Amino acid sequence: MTKKLALKWRQDLLELKEKIKLKQLNTDKALTIAQQLKGEYKQKLVKPNFDIQNAHIQLCETLGQANEILGEYRIDSVPLTTTTFNILISLSSDLTTATSYFNKLLYLRLKPNTYTLNSFIAYCSTVQAGRKIIKSMGKYEVKPNTQTYNALLSLTTNDDQRNEIITAMEDQNIEVNLVTFNTLISRSTSFKTAINYYRELKQRNINPTINTFITILKKATSKAEINETEQLLRNENIRTNNSWDRLHDSKIHG
């Protein structure tokens, strides 16, 4: 019975995370509810585990919040895991702090995974630096994934770099997804290039979202390009949102 309740506890926390993502809850409210859940489940004699602990700190917006919550779980001797450190690294405000958590992970003889190393690409300022992170993955017996290369794409400055990264993904049978193409469009140096990436997205049978069209619209510099983006959006029958409306208004009247 307590095992089922533990699973329910974790699911409740994951649902809070989803509500934050959908902007149905802010972080402070979600954390308040999470603390209430913690009290209720412990009254039912449910012992927290590392999955519950990690789901709880995933609600956090700051490193201070996460460490405070971890301190509470330490009272119950809940162990730290690689996922715990991945969350702490992702919440770190600078490379020095992130590296200190990485070193502590290694000190505890936990194994870093792909997501651990992916987090460090965010601290890179060039594609070359990002590639060094990817090269270091072999040392820890992990392999890059789609998220790895999407992060690397965000560092690119020219189309040659972007083409090389897509080729590397295909050579390793790594999935090219919507985030990949949204990133390619975002980093494009012209509207024409952005449209070419959109066409390739369609050829791969990947469904665009309103964020795709917002990213394309950002590249539009003429009335004709704005009109083309509008027509593509109508063809997809995708509903607009406030972000599109504001950007569209600024493009038309700006």
Image: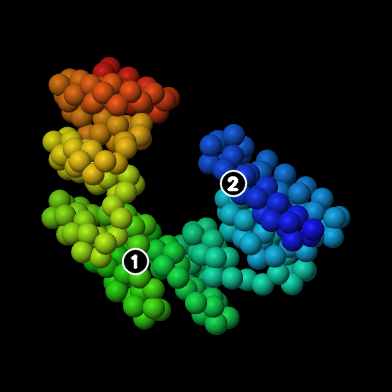
Disc 1 marks a residue whose amino acid type is Pro
Q: What's the residue at 62%, 56% (across, down)?
A: 55
The image shows residue 75 at horizontal and vertical percentages of 77, 68
Sequence-wise first label, 1 or 2:
2
Task: Specify few, some or many for label 2: CA neighbours under 10 Å numbering under 14, 14-19, or 20 or more.
Answer: many
Q: Is residue 155 above or below residue 120?
A: above
Q: Nearer the viewer, residue 38 or 104?
A: 38
Image location (x, y in percent) of residue 208: 31, 36
Tag of residue 17: 2
Q: Say left or right for 61 vs 229.
A: right
Mark 1 touches mark 2? (CB < 8 Å): no
Q: Residue at x 34, y 78 (%)?
A: 138
Inspect the image, locate mark 2, and give the three-letter code of the amino acid beneath it.
Lys
Q: Secondary structure at mark 1?
A: loop
> Is 119 drawn above or below residue 109 in the view shown?
above
Q: Mark 1 Cα within 10 Å, few/some/many (few <14, many 20+)?
A: many
